């Protein structure tokens, strides 16, 4: 649909910024002649909007490192020291009311939970989405485990990343502070292994490649994000892709994220000229490649009806367990809507004899 008539009023996802990872990192090196100064005061002068209370909280939570080691709030910085700050960008505190929502828990122990999120579910409460979110369901689940917990005493969930409302797949939540700190660092340091499966429009020219283009908010439509290859807006974003199967009109690809910007895969694939199939935000909900014949249009419309959301699934998630120090790996099968659509395209191409690239 033309931009002028795009419906961008709905709460597609509750993202106030352009990160799916909920921690940002700041690094500083003190000057050679730095006079001894409490670390919270030093950082207040260098991080915009930082308050002493928030900084002390970050220090106490082990989110401030000096020369690679955690420090106490009364630590005084000296000359030529390397300071690393992991800044919490998680959503503003919103009351999370426990709700009986079914959860597909793939793994759980005392430190963390890995959940397979269905498409259509928002991750956390926020503007326009105060109920029915994943965290509402997690609150109910934990309260059921420990009946003595009240809404006031429910532990804070360590949400260190998120995926779009209409993207399905794996998500990890920390249940303890130390687990949250360790996972946050892994996400920021890009050591978490995340692999997505996407169905995109068109026949990609290359079998594999890397997309490097900043991702930031659209300058006109603020609910949309845009690729800025010159780096003049947004934040750096890197997506690696590999073709898994070609159907001529559409292509099945595997994407590996090196960064975690909001809508990153969706924006990067649109930038390549291959929007995600059925993505109503980025032009994938109409015929991008194919004929104008009524039979083909009906076939595509049937596919849209089966998968009425962007065809994107967070399939794998691997990280070092914050408690054991061992690497663990999880895999989630493609959901039925994507599997059915992929099968339909496979049959359609085999019966029409369409020849794809490569």
Image (cartoon, rainbow, N blue to C red):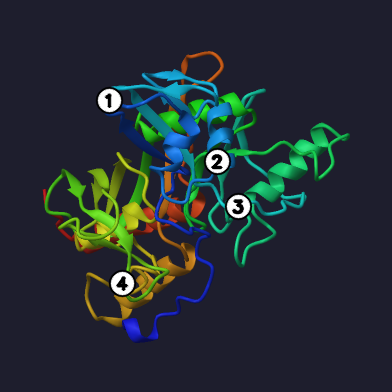
Neighbour tally class for label 2: few under 14, some 14-19, many 20 plus, Cα within 10 Å: few
Is residue 159 something one can see in this rendering? Answer: yes
The residue lying toward the viewer, choosing from 52 and 299, is 52
Disc 3/disc 4 C-alpha distance (Å):
26 Å
Asked if residue 119 is positioned above or below residue 255 in the image, the reply reads: below
Under circle 2, the secondary element is: helix
In the image, which is nearer the foreground, mark 1 or mark 3? 1
The residue lying toward the viewer, choosing from 305 and 323, is 323
Dot 2 or dot 1, earlier in sequence: 1
Is residue 274 something one can see in this rendering? Answer: no
Disc 2/disc 1 C-alpha distance (Å):
24 Å
| Residue on which disc 2 sits | 52
Disc 4/disc 1 C-alpha distance (Å):
43 Å
| Residue on which disc 1 sits | 33
Neighbour tally class for label 1: few under 14, some 14-19, many 20 plus, Cα within 10 Å: few
Q: Which mark is residue 219?
A: 4
């Amino acid at each position: 649909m033309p931009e002028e008539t795009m419906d961008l009023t709905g709460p597609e996802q509750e993202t106030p910024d352009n990160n799916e990872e909920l921690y940002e990192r700041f690094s500083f090196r003190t000057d050679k002649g730095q006079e001894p100064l409490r670390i919270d005061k030093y950082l207040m002068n260098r991080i915009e909007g930082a308050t002493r209370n928030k900084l002390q909280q970050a220090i106490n939570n082990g989110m401030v490192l000096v020369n690679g080691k955690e420090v106490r709030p009364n630590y005084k910085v000296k000359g030529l020291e390397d300071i690393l700050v992991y800044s919490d960008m998680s959503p503003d505190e919103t009351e999370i009311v426990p709700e009986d929502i079914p959860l597909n828990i793939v793994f759980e122990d005392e430190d963390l939970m890995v959940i397979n999120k269905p498409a259509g579910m928002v991750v956390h409460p926020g503007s326009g989405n105060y109920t029915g979110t994943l965290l509402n369901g997690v609150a109910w689940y934990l309260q059921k485990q420990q009946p003595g917990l009240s809404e006031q005493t429910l532990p804070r969930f360590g949400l260190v990343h998120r995926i779009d409302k209409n993207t399905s797949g794996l998500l990890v939540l920390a249940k303890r502070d130390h687990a949250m700190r360790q996972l946050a660092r892994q996400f920021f340091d890009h050591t978490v292994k995340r692999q997505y499966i996407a169905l995109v429009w068109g026949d990609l020219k290359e079998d594999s490649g890397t997309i490097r283009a900043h991702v930031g908010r659209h300058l006109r439509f603020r609910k949309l994000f845009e690729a800025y290859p010159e780096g003049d807006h947004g934040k750096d974003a890197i997506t690696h892709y590999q073709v898994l199967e070609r159907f001529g009109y559409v292509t099945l690809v595997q994407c590996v994220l090196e960064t975690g910007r909001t809508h990153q895969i969706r924006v990067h694939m649109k930038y390549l000229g291959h929007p995600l199939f059925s993505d109503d935000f980025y032009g994938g909900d109409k015929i991008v490649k194919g004929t104008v014949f009524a039979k083909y249009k009906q076939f595509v419309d049937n596919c849209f009806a089966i998968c009425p959301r962007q065809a994107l699934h967070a399939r794998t998630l691997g990280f070092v367990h914050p408690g054991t120090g061992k690497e663990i790996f999880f895999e989630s099968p493609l959901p039925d809507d994507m599997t059915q659509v992929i099968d339909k395209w496979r049959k359609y191409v085999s019966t029409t004899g369409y020849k794809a690239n490569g």
